[in-house]
Amino acid sequence: MSGGAPLKIRIRGLRKSFGRKVVLDGVDLDVPAASVMVVIGGSGSGKSVLLKCILGLIEPDAGAIEIDGRDILKMSAREREAVRGRIGMLFQNGALFDSLPVWENVMFGQLAKGRLSRRAARAQAAEFLGQVGLAASVGDLYPSELSGGMQKRVALARAIAARPDILFFDEPTTGLDPIMGAVIDGLIVDCVRRLGSTAIAITHDMASASRMGDRAAMLYEGRIVWTGAASDLLRSGNPKVDQFTHGRREGPIQMELME
Amino acid sequence: MNLLLDFLAALGRAVIGAVRGAGSLALFGASALSHLVRPPFYWRMFGRALVDIGYFSLPVVALTAIFTGMVLALQSYLGFSRFSAQSATANVVVLSITRELGPVLAGLMVAGRIGAAMAAEIGTMRVTDQIDALSTLSTNPMKYLVTPRLVAGVIALPVLVVIADILGVMGGFIISVVKLGFGPNMYITNTLNFMQTGDVVSGLVKAAVFGFLIALMGCYQGYHSRGGAQGVGSATTSAVVGASILILAFDYILTEMFFAR
C-alpha cells in the first residue's frame, strides 16, 4: 500500500480488552521502513495501548505484531527483550527518573547494557543533549529543576541515545506552548531522519501531525478507520477524519459524555 | 433467603480476594528473589536502600529502644515488687528486649518509615510511567527496583535490632541504677548471666524476616498502585498497615517455631 517500501511494522487483527471494555478491536496497521506514521484519535481511543502492546508492556488478547517480518508475540521472552532494546520511546509526560541527574537519565539505557563506564557515559550525554539543543551543563541538573519543554527534550535525548531503529512518541507536544511544540516536532523529525529510524507518533494535535508525519492513520473505537498521506489529513474525504481534524462538534463521532 | 445468599456471596468474594492477594504477593516476592541468581545485581540501588533503611532509621529505632527499656525496667520493678521479686528486673528487661520488643518495635518503626517511603516512591514511578520507561531502557523493573530493596531490608533490620537490643538494655540499666537503686555491677552481671545466645539469635532471625516483609509490602503496593496521587496515597497506607500486621503475625509464628516445643 505504500509504494514498495519494505514494511518495518505490520499489525494484523490486534485485540485488547480490559474487563468488558474493548480498547483495541482488530487493529490493522502497516508502517513502512524509515518513515514517520502519525496515529490520531480521540482521548481514550486506545492509542497508548497500541504502543504499549508493540513494546510488550501490555499483552494483547489476539492478533499479530510483525517487526521486520517476525511476529513478536510468538517470540521467546529473551528475543522480545532484544526487540524491545531496539525501540526507543518518548513517554507522554517524559517519565524521566526524578532520582537521577539529567545526564544519567539520558544515558540510562546505555549504562544498563553495561557497554560504558559512568565517566564515558557522562561525557557522551553532552553530545545527545546537544542534539536536542540543550547545553552540556543541563546534565548536572535534576529533572524537577527543568521546565516542561526542557524535560521533553531530555526525554527525547534519552529515547534516541541507544540509536534505536524504531521510535515511539506518545503525544510529544501535549502540555507545551505552540512554539515549543513546533520546536519539539522539528527535533523529532531531525532525530528520526538522522538515525534513519521508523517512527510511530500518536497525537491529537493536527499541526504537529502534519509537521511530523509521512503517513497518518486514525484510530476510532478500537479500529483504524482511515490511512493515508499525512499531508492529506485535512482533506481526507473521510467524514470521521474530517470531523476530528477540523474539531467539529457535529458529525459521525458522538462524544460519549452521558454514560 | 436472598439476604443470606447476598451475605454468603459477599463473604466468598472477600475470601477469594484475600487468597488472590496473598497469592499475588507471594508470586511477586518469588519473582523478585529469582532475580538474585540472575545477573546483573544493582549494587548502587542496593547501597542506596541500605543507607535509607539502616542508617536513616537509626535515630527512630534508637529512641524507641531506649524508652522501651526504661519503661520495661520501671514496670517490671513495680509489678514484681508486689511479690518481692524486684531482683528479676534485669532478667525481664534483657529477655523481653532481645526476644520480642527489639525486633517487633524496630520492625514497626521501620515499617512506618521505610514501607511508606518505598510504596510512595515506586508508586509515583508507576503512575508517571517511569516503570514502563525502565522496561524500554533494557532494565527489568523488578530487578532494578525491588530485588535490591528486599536484600537491603533483610540485611539492615538485624543490624538495627542489635543496636536496639543494646540501647534497650541500656535504657533499663539507667533507670534501674539511677532511680531504682540497683548496683551497676550487679545489674550487668545479672543481665549477662541470664542472657542466652538463643534469645538474641531468635530476635535477629525475626528481624531479618521483618525486614523482608517491610520491603516486600512497600514494593508490592507501590508497584501495583493505580490512578494518580490518590492511588499512591492508598498504596502507602496499605504498605504500612499490611507490613505491620504481617510483622505481628509472623512474630507469633516464629516465636512458636523457636520456643514452643
Image (cartoon, helix red, strand yellow):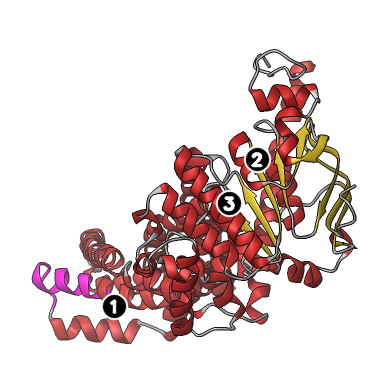
Residue at the (67%, 49%) spot, across then down? B21
- Asked which secondary structure carries label 2, the reply is helix
| Residue B252 appears anywhere in the view | no
Q: Chain of mark 3?
A: A
Quadrant containing the N terminus of chain B in the rendered view: top right
Q: Position of residue B77 (x, y in %)?
A: 21, 64
Residue at the (65%, 23%) spot, across then down? A246
**The label number, if any, that marks residue A222 in the structure image:** none
B261 or B216: nearer the eye?
Answer: B216
Residue picked out by circle 1: B166
Tag 2: residue type? Ser
Residue at the (46%, 56%) spot, across then down? B121
Question: In the image, is residue A83 above or below residue A98?
Answer: below
A67 or B242: nearer the eye?
Answer: A67
**The label number, if any, that marks residue A91 in the structure image:** 3
Mark pair 2, 1: CA separation: 70 Å
Q: Is residue A4 left or right of residue B57?
A: right
**In front: mark 2 or mark 3?**
2
